[in-house]
Image (cartoon, rainbow, N blue to C red):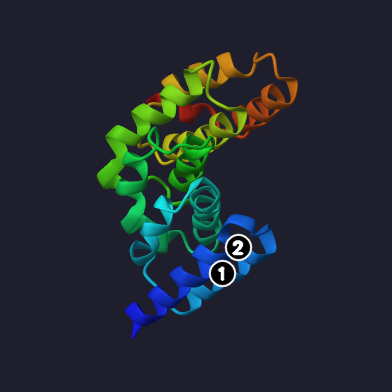
Amino acid sequence: MIQDMSQELIEQLKASLATSDATNRKFWAQWIINDQIPLQSLMSLLHFGDGTSQRFMWLIGDICELDPESVRPCLPMLFSLRNEMPFPGMPRSVAKWLWLTNVPVEMEAESVSQLFAWMESESASIACKSYAAKALFDLATDRRISSRRFVRCLEKEAEHENRAYGKRIRKILNGFPGDNFYTN
């Protein structure tokens, strides 16, 4: 029955996802969650043309905002595609999903390395860097990564030429816990 529902939904999404708006995607996200349709069953949508696949990526973000646990099983595969999709924005989305799912432990080493790489990259988008900063902040707060490395990275990024981004990073830096935070 779930497979039939998944196939029906895939057909609907193939027909309309490329021209969808945020309202449509939020509706579909809620439907997928309410009907407990496994996200894995919809992954073929990543290969139906750039418009469909890019908006499917956005739909995954909507699902993740509502129910991060439903995205976790697909996260290793999605992470592996971070540099392979033919449209911009996949790294930003992966950084967002990692943040919203609190970086699953089984992906922690590779994910942390990538999150720092995005933070330190001059070519990474501001949105990607911002989500990477949020994910790393949570990891540092949970003492899963070195807070010293993260603080150094934030201090450097706070001086970014994009003033709005620099301000956002300073806000994250100022939100750190007290002095005992720097013990790692």
Instruction: Check contact, mark 1 vs mark 2: CB within 8 A.
Output: yes
Specify the amino acid type for callout 1: Trp
Q: Image point 39% across, 32% down: which residue?
A: 83
How many marks do you count on the picture? 2
- The residue indicated by pointer 1 is 28
Q: Residue furthest right?
A: 163
**What element does badge 1 sit on?**
helix
Which one is in front, 84 or 40? 84
Question: Mark 2 — residue?
Answer: 25
Secondary structure at numbered mark 2: helix
Query: Is residue 104 among what the camera can see?
Result: no
Q: Where residue 78 sits: x, y (%)?
A: 36, 46
> Which is more toward the observer, 8 or 168?
8
Residue 101: x and y, percent? Answer: 43, 51
- Tell whether 70 sits left or right of 34: left
Q: Which residue lies at the image location 39% right of the left edge and 74% below the top edge? A: 7
Residue 142 in view here: yes
Rounded to the nearest angstrom, the CA distance separating label 1 from label 2 is: 5 Å
**Quadrant housing the C terminus:** top left
Q: Relative to 56, say whether 138 is above or below.
A: above
Res. 74 image quadrant: bottom left
| Frontmost residue, 123 versus 163 | 123
